[in-house]
Amino acid sequence: MLTAENEPRQPYKNYHDWYSNQKISDLFRKSREAESVFRKTGITFAVYGKEDASERLIPFDIVPRIISGPEWRRLSQGIEQRVAALNAFLDDIYHKQEIIKAGRVPRQLIEKNDAFLPQMIGVRPPGGVYTHIIGTDIVRTGENQFYVLEDNARTPSGVSYMLENRETMMQMFPELFYQNKVRPVENYPKLLRRSLSGVAPPGCMGKPRVAVLTPGSYNSAYYEHAYLADQMGVELVEGSDLRVIDGKVAMRTTQGYEAIDVLYRRVDDDYLDPLTFNPDSALGVAGIMDVYRAGNITIANAPGTGIADDKAIYSYMPDIVEFYTGRKAILENVPTWRCSEADSLTYVLDNLPDLVVKEVHGSGGYGMLVGPTASKRECAEFAKKLRAKPDNYIAQPTLSLSTVPILVKKGIAPRHVDLRPFVLVSSKEIHIIPGGLTRVALKEGSLVVNSSQGGGTKDTWVLED
Amino acid sequence: MLLGRTANGLYWMFRFIERAENTARLIDAGSRMSLTSMQGSDEEWASVLQSAGVHAAYMAAHDQVTAAEAVNYLLRDKSNPSSVASAIELARSNGRMVRTALTREAWEATNECYLSAKALLKRQVAPASLPQVLDQIKRQCSLIRGTFHGTMLRNEVYNFARIGTFIERADSTARILDVKYYVLLPASSYIGTTIDNVQWESILRSVSAHRSYTWAYDPDYNPVNIADFLILNDCMPRSLAYCHDKIVNNLAILERLYGQRHPAHDTAEAIKAMLEEGDIQQIVSSGLHEFLEDFLGQNNRLGHEISQAYQFYPG
């Protein structure tokens, strides 16, 4: 919030004035109120492997993270460029594979990758859109300096927190929204619905029927699935509700089966169709891939998009962006060592205490090593894993992430954050929601923001110019 | 348009809310009996367990019936699917599954009911605080009902929820009567002793009707009037006649809405007609127990037919 000279940074000026007139006890009261609102609403997430805490709240911090108009503009140009490149990349690798032929990305990295689906070769999704919804993870390291951490091109989650956090802030601090011109995010469900309806299969007559596919109420993100279906006014379906009838995917209603045109699935590729992928899956629909290939249903995001947010592909993103857009990437990639390459592996092993090492296919902060905070023993154990299976890992330097203020016992204190803006892609446009999910590491000095590892969230404001 | 699974979830959500309240009421009536009767309190608890339909399961896990253990089993035991704690948890997990069919208010009331019951029933409840705990739970259930009535559209969602409520309620009332039917038989009623009066009042108390009875009938308890009140009186919101009048209405709305008639419609109308034309003297003299057993079977069958008609489960 403050500059080196202890002056409030420009976007925080109004907020700082307001904050200076608040009593800390009032802020704590509001903070408790917010927590009870979240508990009452049931905005919980499940932590896998913890039976007693099967439903937990993600801690919410009431100090907003504020981004200025000009800074956002630069950021969103960068995101738009990157998202366009990702879609072009997906279309290319499932069709002509020009980027491989041009020698910019190694063939085996694509074709040997578990996230690459041979079943998608030659299939063009309705409207040509692969990633209808993207959540790009970004960190800020300084004025106008952003790095992309991850592209989340499969099924990014967290948008319900963006919406509920804003709703809660508007209820608790209406005066702040008079004093600051905050760009709205609350039309996201409407935009999402419009965006999904816009890519219905060409054969769809009349108003497209959209549904959200959830793995079920025990899934960690179930709250979000229900929330989005509710806000969009579409059905929330499970695999057991669906069946392929007459070449269409249909859902079992109280009056019989009715066809679905667009399925916003929150189920991984592996579980989507037991006939094509994991035969043990009860979460998907037997035969849906045949319907998809015949062009009779839209699946969002398209099967096989996971290849684009694979951590091994990530290191090639600057090339990918340049290859498809003809320009240098606006947003920087974090320098990445691919442990599959011998030189890199040696470097990583020699410098473990300074690096963050991640699993290529991992997510949620599981199975990673944060060198600077790890003990010697943890580093040594991780080194063993690395040597055993180098292909499985990438490593990155620890960045000096920007901090934002959070409310703590003594008042406010800086904590590290990242940012996940949400992007909707239709056949006509790329729409970036001005805001996003700000995740914050609640422990002093910590760089791990994942909610499964004790991170919290806060409202994210993008100011009008 | 409503998913079959969602209709099923709504139906069971409301059955479980109803069951939680009914079990709470049975515990209330049981503890009242323990206070009033000089002896045989444990027998009373055995019949409460029977009314809740969990006597056999209780005996499988306990050596004998004691007041403390019976109360705990009915109130908190998670292995008992009809305990207040289980029923509320099941209502809430069904509610979570059908979250998109509920208004925010109705969902939040359900979630709050669950959170508050979880806190209230964390530890064994001492007899001194039992009335207060039961009261609090009934109040939370009323809040769900209130928000539901105040905020929900009167569409198919509403009708499936209502059908669940009334199937469960009719089942509960018939069961309470059946466990105590001998108390209402003419042979035991000629004396009108204090103990009879206590027994009769207990039946009425289990359906929260010991006061309303005196508005509808002669204030002195009379077993035939009590049976009439709970079986045939269509003003009494927990009577079999009232419940089935509502079920027929709810099913008729679905029939109009969907333009589809199912065997369930015929079954429901037949049960309603049977109750409308019924005569209490005749029911009592030709066998109250047989009548109630037959009713419970028909009520059950209707529930099954409804689940088939509206595709609650994958075929």
Image (spheres, rainbow, N blue to C red):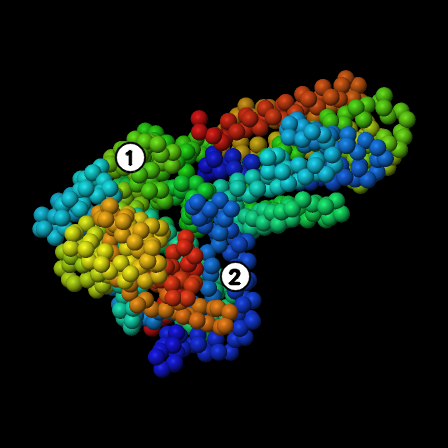
- Mark 2 Cα within 10 Å, few/some/many (few <14, many 20+)? many
- Mark 1 Cα within 10 Å, few/some/many (few <14, many 20+)? some
Left/right placement of residue A36 relative to residue B32 reads: left
Check the picture and name the quadrant holding the C terminus of chain B: top left
Q: How many tags in the picture?
A: 2
- Residue B20: give x, y in percent of width and height: 64, 39
Is the C-beta separation of discs 2 and 1 under 8 Å? no
- Residue A402: give x, y in percent of width and height: 33, 69
Check the picture and name the quadrant holding the N terminus of chain B: top left
Q: Which mark is residue A277?
A: 1
Q: Which residue is at 38% across, 77% downward? A: A2
Q: CA distance from mark 2 to mark 1?
A: 42 Å
Q: Which residue is at 53% across, 40% downward? A: B94
Discs 2, 1: same chain:
yes
- Secondary structure state at the residue bearing disc 1: loop
Q: Which residue is at 68% across, 22% downward? A: B293
Q: Nearer the viewer, residue A79 or B23?
A: B23
Residue B101 makes an appearance in the image: no
Disc 2 marks a residue whose amino acid type is: Ala
Left/right placement of residue A436 relative to residue A153 reads: right
Q: Nearer the viewer, residue B106 or B117?
A: B117
Left/right placement of residue A328 relative to residue B293 reads: left
Q: Which residue is mark 2?
A: A34
Disc 1 marks a residue whose amino acid type is: Phe
